[in-house]
Amino acid sequence: SIYVCKCSIFQLFYIAGIEPHPFLMAWGAFVLIDLAQMYNEEELYWILLSKGYKTYRYLPTHFKTFYPCYNSETPRNIISIMDVFGKKHFPERYDDKKGIVFANGMFDKVKEGIAPLSAAHLKDPNIAFFNDINPTHTQGDELVCVIPATFANLKTTTKKMLMTWNTYKKAVNE
């Protein structure tokens, strides 16, 4: 079975039974790991709608595998997950050729001056890819991203950060 989690960071905490702490709120996506452990061997994916490159940058910073990405073709089963999600939740606004949910001027957009893209930003292959695949992101168009929610998919530095937090949390609660 495949479980897809489409929730806000706050909802993830309550689903996993975790008290939201400011540190964890900054890294809230990792609550999915607790959910993945609850589902054991089942496949669990997190769907992220990214309208800005700063949000998209969380993916290569913290996860080994995520889609879409610049250095790997998106597997057919992941495209299917994106398409089912997009067509179900945004039937009139989802473009299955691009994997984009269009805002059509009706929804929030990236505020001017908040996250301008410079030539230096575009040297990062992840940011350049995001800008190429979703060139209208500043108008509020969102890229549908899929991340396998497993502990093994976390980068080493993120695992260390989470283990440090867990050690701190246990010490405070004793």
Image: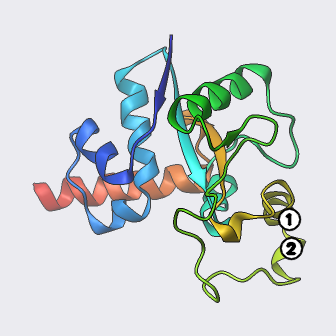
Q: Position of residue 93 (x, y in %)?
A: 63, 44
State the residue at coordinates (16%, 62%): 172
Q: Position of residue 40 (x, y in %)?
A: 42, 17
- Judged from this view, the residue extending furthest toward the top is 1
- Judged from this view, the residue extending furthest toward the left is 174
Provide the secondary structure element on which disc 1 rests: helix
Instruction: In the rendered view, tell whether residue 51 sits above or below residue 97.
Output: below
Classify residue 77 as left or right of residue 152: right
Instruction: In the rendered view, tell whether residue 12 sits above or below residue 169.
Output: above
Classify residue 113 as left or right of residue 68: left
> In the picture, which quadrant includes the C terminus?
bottom left
Disc 1 residue type?
Answer: Ala
Residue at label 1? 128
Sequence order check, earlier mark of 2 and 1: 2
Query: Within the image, what quadrant is residue 94 found in?
Result: top right
Q: Position of residue 110 (x, y in %)?
A: 60, 74
State the residue at coordinates (60%, 85%): 114
Residue 106's mark? Answer: none
Q: Position of residue 26 (x, y in %)?
A: 41, 65
Q: CA distance from mark 2 to mark 1?
A: 5 Å
Q: Nearer the viewer, residue 16 or 170?
A: 16
Classify residue 78 as left or right of residue 47: right
Disc 2 residue type?
Answer: Leu
State the residue at coordinates (48%, 15%): 42
Residue at label 2? 122
- Mark 2 near mark 1, Cβ–Cβ under 8 Å? yes
